[in-house]
Image: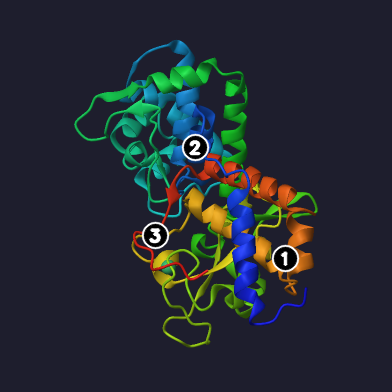
Amino acid sequence: MRVTNESLPILLEQVKQATFEMIEFTNISPTLEDYWRSIILFGRNSATYKFALAKSLLELAPSGKSFVTWEELARPFSRHITEHLQQRDKQGSSSSSQFLHSCRAFNRGTLTQQQLIDITVRQGFENVIDAFHVVGSSEIPERFFHGKRRGAKGIDISDRLFQLLEQYQFQNLPHEVEARWRLVETAWQLDLSTHLVDVEYREFNGLLVPETLKMRRKSVTSCRSGLNGYQKGKCFYCFNEISIEEGSLDLADVDHFLPHTLIRVSAIPNINGVWNLVLACQTCNRGERGKFYRVPALHLLKRLHQRNEFLITSLHPLKETLIAQTGRDEAQRRSFLQTHYNEATRLLIHTWQPEFEYPAAF
Ligand SMILES: [Zn+2]
């Protein structure tokens, strides 16, 4: 069928009808291991203390103790930090950490182990206890321990950590923490600004190497006008007006539907592919309640599939690219989206949708 301006709305209706009739997309519930991994892979990193705490928790769990004092926690925690400092001197983005200076002093032999443990109890846990369960911008719904840093004598180990211990995968978790820790400290050692790198990686000759923002932005923004045809000048998520004129105040952001941060763990093939790119208004993409590292709600996944199917059915120039990236027929492409949507949810935990949607424009 030749697609003309007049036939486009009819075609869109047909695609909507077809995607409406098909099997619905479904949400998955992350497992305990997923929650744990999301902390390790996507929690905030301003120092590597989170990794030291994670390794300490995994080490303490088999003892079955439900309450761990600061001193009991300080032993493995300071051991992990001092061991890592011997390999890489940079373990935080701030160079003035008193606690790290004390760990270095211990490594030089000018502090005893008990002195180091006392200092760790006083200074080592300042931010990490309260921040441990934060992924993206908010806490995940499961906790592996309870307790705040201030006013407590230690932490209560949660049943969740003991349940994690019973999983077959438990044995792999310390190795995963270690691998992640090494990647992060390598980026810092290279003195790559965390803003530039945000410890994101791409594959190069089988190795993960830090990727700069510049490298990823270039190819992605060039598809703005290609995507705008379908979106008719509206935000993909909320249908707010957007512009694709360079320099315009409402210039659309090219957004990765499944967040680009997933590239860190190479979880999604072709994450910069057009199948995963949409135009978003600045409010949705980076406003106060913007999407950031969260996975769009299920109805938005359906909208994405509908968009991709429409571009393919309308013989859009991007048709072959979309097919190459996501599958030969509709069923394959739907399954591709569902698989990677599940993967993204398991890794990033939090979902997002705009607070308000304007009337649907596509
Ligand atoms: Zn929007």
The disc placed on residue 122 is none
Question: Residue 8, relative to residue 137: is it above or below?
Answer: below
Q: Is mark 1 within 8 Å of ligand 1?
A: no
Identify which amino acid the numbered label 2 is placed on. Answer: Phe
Q: Which residue is mark 1?
A: 312
Q: Secondary structure at mark 1?
A: helix
Write down the quadrant of residue 192 in the picture: bottom right
- Distance between the Cα atoms at labels 1 and 2? 45 Å
Task: Kindly identify the residue that appears in the image at 57 percent across and 44 percent down.
Answer: 24
- Distance between the Cα atoms at labels 2 and 3? 33 Å
Query: Mark 3 or mark 1: which comes first in sequence?
Result: 1
Which mark is in front, 3 or 1?
Answer: 1
Q: Quick one: which residue is furthest to the top in this view?
A: 64
Quadrant in which ligand 1 is drawn: bottom left
Residue 17 can be seen in this image = yes
Q: Which residue is mark 2?
A: 51
Q: Is mark 3 within 8 Å of ligand 1?
A: yes
Q: Secondary structure at mark 2?
A: helix
* Residue 113, position as x, y percentages in the image: 41, 26
Q: Residues within 10 Å of mark 1 (few under 14, many from 20)?
A: some
181 or 38: nearer the eye?
38
Q: Secondary structure at mark 3?
A: loop
Question: Residue 96, relative to residue 25: is it above or below?
Answer: below
305 or 41: nearer the eye?
305
The disc placed on residue 354 is 3
Question: Residue 284, relative to residue 178: is it above or below?
Answer: below
Question: Residue 39, relative to residue 357: is it above or below?
Answer: above
